[in-house]
Each structure stands twice: as C-alpha cells, then as structure tokens.
Amino acid sequence: MKTNKLVATTLALFMSVGAFAQTVDEIVDKHVAAMGGMDKLSAVKTLAREQSISVQGMEIPTKSIVVVGKSMRSESTIMGNAMIQVVDGTTGWKVTPAMMQGTGEPEDMTAEELKQSLSQLDPFGALVNYKDKGSKVELVGKEKVGKDDAYHLKVTTKDGQVIDEFLDANTYLVSKVKATTNGQVGEIAFSDYKETEGIKFANTMEMESPQAGTLTFITNKITINGPVDETVFKKPAK
C-alpha cells in the first residue's frame, strides 16, 4: 500500500512539473506569436531605430543600429556632444563626453559594460529562442503591472544573469522588465506597441534612474533590414 502511494505521489509530481513546463512554453509561444511570429523575427538581420530620450526637461536624439547577433552602435547627441556605445563581435568601445566625466575620445568598454551591452545584439528580448540561448525560464505567477494582469517569467541566462519579464496577460507583449546591474535593480516599462513590417515594437519605454529620474524613450522610426555600413562599428584611431 505504501509503495502504491509512493508511486502515485511520484507520478503526480512528475505530471505537475511537466504541466508547469508546458505552461511556460505555451506562454512564450504566445508571446512570440504576438510579436509577429518566429518566421518574421528570424528574418530580421539588421534593425535601425531613431528615438528621442526625454530626461530632466531635455530631449536627446538617439540613433541605433544592430546587426543581429554581431554588432551594435548607439549614438546620442547631448548639448552638441556625441555619446557613443559600440559592440563589434566580442569587443566594445565608447565615447563619453567630458561633460559626463568622460574623455571625449574613443576608449575600450570595461568588462562589465561590455557584458551589459552584448544583450543589445538580441533586439527581441530574452524569451525569444531562450532554449537555444541556453537560458532557463520559470513561471513565477500572475501579478499586476499597473492595473493589468501580467505573467511574471523569471529568465536565468547561461551566465547566471536573472531577468524578470512581465507579459501582459491579454496581449502577451512585454509590459515590464527588471534586471540587476552592478548591484542595482533596473526596471523598464514598455507600452504603446506599434507594428513595423508585421512586427510589434514598444513605441514608448520608461526607465527610472537614481541619478537622472525618469527617462522616457519615444521611437520615431524603425527600419528593418536596411543597408549598414559596417565601418561604423570599428574603433577610430586616436
């Protein structure tokens, strides 16, 4: 009798774990479908964005270009000064204006800066193709993000970084992302999704910064698979 109970308990536990894993994959599949579907996402090789960042009453124009999985360049203009971040393969460099305690000259990123920037080579987030990336995803539960229900998914990457993704329970699009960087928890809210060539992108992103307050990113233009001059990723000689 005890053996039968043990077998029943083990089977129930196994089925429960299987159902839980299936639920995670079902949610992720709906998320991918809501974004436009895997076929469309996989067909994106380059992605260019033109954005405006609003912070402390200033409007900062920003342009970024990503060669998916390979290179990234982001350039902002702050009071006439260029702030640049570039990842090219496994190396990274930056230009930080003197007004922001930088040198104004091209210099290598630190190891931590490079680690953070490498995530930008993947423009569709941690959930898409998470198994191929070696990540693990757990369903934490259903929570409120603002007034709306959201699925809270915990992503653990293969290098141990933990990213909390919140998917709107109705649209299955990302409404919030939380991650810890340099011991500080960062949080970005996503809203006002618009479609470009069949793929949905958040037109508005809001991030809280201890130093600068609320940063609001408004996307003005997105170009998919446009031409890219790859020399822009090369670090200039001093």
Image: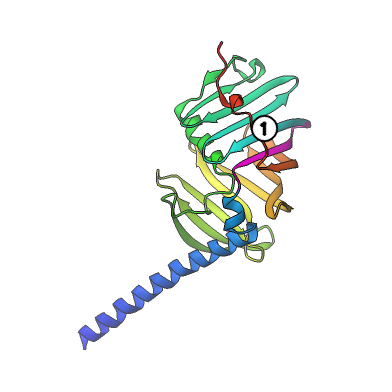
Residue placed at 53% from the left, 30% from the top?
Answer: 87
Q: Residue at x 65, y 42 (%)?
A: 225
As rendered, which of 167 and 57 lies closer to the eye?
A: 167
State the residue in front, 183 or 223.
223
Q: Residue 196 location in percent, x, y?
A: 72, 50
118 magenta-colored? no
Count neighbours of disc 1 (C-alpha within 10 A) and say few if under 14, some if 14 to 19, many if 20 or more: few
- Residue denoted by label 1: 212
Magenta span main SS: strand
| Left or right of 69, for residue 46 | right
In which quadrant of the rendered image does the N terminus lie?
bottom left
Does residue 46 belong to the magenta stretch? Answer: yes
**Left or right of 5 on screen, residue 137:** right
Q: For residue 78, which quarter of the picture? A: top right
Amino acid carrying label 1: it is: Ala
Which residue occupies 56% across, 39% down? 120
- The region drawn magenta spans 44-58
Q: Residue at x 40, y 71 (%)?
A: 18
